[in-house]
Image (cartoon, helix red, strand yellow):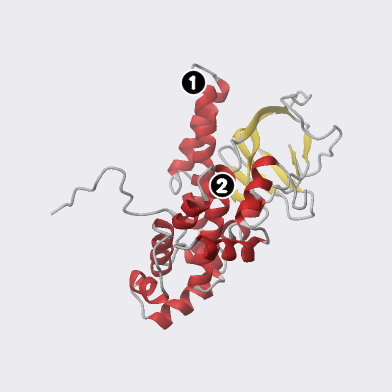
């Protein structure tokens, strides 16, 4: 018998979606660029932003300016730069940069084959960084593979259509497609973790591990619940000791340490983006005492909740 769920009920909470929702600090920005060989463009480092390059037509080479190996990028490929790493895009490995860094929609001069690239970034709040993203390499290359990642390929195709032929609703559709593309690309990266050399490790392994994923989903689904290691172990279907070892080995934190960190991260977002009273914020992250919450929050970030709210909603600085 299938149980009918109440409206709005979320039977599973997606950890990746939760993490990105908390980290995001605004709408994605993008620019459609058409280059004609020979060409090379530099993109300066952008801390606090996850950059991206999507090749819609043609081919190019991405050369990280920090001396890391170059990456060949083909049509339909997505490259994410989680820490906003500076890089050069070029038609070939040997083409030198002869113009200033990209700014706006200026096309590149040349009369060779054309490459159409969507460049941009997702603004992130560095104070709410999650180890799930911190473990990503500086350059995440998701090659076009419709057979394995059909959703990513579809998002790229839809973006290309909207950007090359703008119509009614394009301005609203493109940011939503960019949000979807980020999730699809990260999903593809984590799902491919078992196929990479050496297999998955860290959070890539955690997200491919059913017991740890079950515990993470439980904490993200109801962070205010009075979770204990025993309760989380039951969610994971393991003994208390086996679960605690497994969780810490894969995520780098003991279960309750991660829970406290996640609660404080959620509280920071609520303080910065809402006018909820401190008692409500405390309750939403599992504290029945406003005093206990304030003490835990100050220990976590060095500021009392009220001070944190003033600093982060008025653009001030501690001590002003």
In this rendering, position of residue 31 left or right of residue 188 = right
Is disc 1 surrounded by few (<14), some (14 to 19) or many (20+) residues within 10 Å? few
Residue 28: x %, y % from top left: 60, 36
Image quarter (top left, top right, bottom left or bottom right) of the N terminus: bottom left
Instruction: Please name whichever residue, 73 or 286, is drawn nearer the observer in this view of the structure.
Output: 286
Residue 82 visible to an observer of this rendering = no
Q: Which residue is mark 1?
A: 169
Q: Is residue 29 above or below residue 232?
A: above
Proximity of marks 2 and 1: CB atoms separated by less than 8 Å = no
Please state the horizontal and vertical placement of residue 27, each as a whole percent of the image: 59, 35
Determine the residue positioned at 49% across, 64% down: 194
| Tag shown at residue 143 | 2
| Circle 2 or circle 1, nearest the eye | 1
Viewer-side residue, 93 vs 181? 181
Numbered disc total? 2
Height in image: 86 above or below 27? below
- Can you give x and y, in whole percent of width and height, for residue 17 in the image? 47, 49
What residue lies at 46% left-to-right and 78% top-to-bottom?
244
Tag 2's secondary structure?
A: loop
Q: Is residue 289 above or below residue 278?
A: below
For marks 2 and 1, the one nearer the N-term is 2
Marks 2/1: CA distance? 29 Å
Q: Counting other residues with Cα less than 10 Å from the Cα at mark 2, is it few (<14), some (14-19), or many (20 or more)?
A: many
């Amino acid at each position: 018998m299938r149980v009918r769920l109440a409206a709005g009920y979320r039977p599973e909470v997606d950890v990746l979606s939760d993490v990105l929702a908390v980290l995001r600090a605004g709408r994605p920005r993008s620019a459609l660029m058409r280059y004609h060989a020979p060409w090379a463009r530099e993109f300066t480092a952008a801390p606090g932003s996850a950059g991206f390059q999507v090749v819609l037509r043609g081919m190019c080479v991405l050369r990280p300016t920090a001396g890391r190996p170059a990456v060949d990028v083909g049509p339909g490929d997505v490259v994410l730069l989680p820490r906003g790493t500076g890089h050069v895009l070029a038609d070939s490995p040997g083409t030198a940069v002869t113009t200033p860094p990209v700014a706006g929609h200026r096309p590149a001069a040349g009369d060779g084959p054309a490459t159409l690239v969507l460049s941009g970034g997702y603004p992130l709040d560095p104070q709410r960084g999650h180890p799930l993203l911190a473990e990503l390499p500086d350059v995440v290359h998701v090659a076009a593979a419709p057979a394995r990642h059909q959703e990513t390929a579809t998002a790229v195709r839809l973006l290309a259509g909207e950007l090359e032929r703008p119509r009614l609703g394009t301005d609203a559709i493109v940011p939503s497609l960019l949000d979807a593309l980020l999730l699809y690309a990260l999903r593809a990266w984590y799902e491919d973790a078992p196929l990479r050399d050496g297999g998955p490790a860290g959070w890539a392994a955690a997200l491919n591990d059913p017991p740890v994923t079950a515990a993470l989903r439980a904490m993200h689904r109801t962070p205010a619940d009075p979770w204990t290691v025993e309760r989380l172990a039951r969610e994971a279907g393991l003994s208390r000791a086996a679960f605690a070892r497994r969780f810490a080995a894969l995520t780098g934190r003991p279960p309750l340490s991660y829970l406290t960190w996640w609660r404080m991260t959620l509280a920071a977002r609520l303080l910065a983006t809402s006018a909820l009273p401190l008692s409500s914020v405390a309750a939403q992250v599992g504290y029945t005492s406003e005093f206990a919450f304030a003490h835990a929050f100050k220990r976590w970030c060095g500021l009392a909740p009220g001070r944190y709210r003033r600093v982060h909603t008025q653009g001030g600085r501690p001590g002003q």
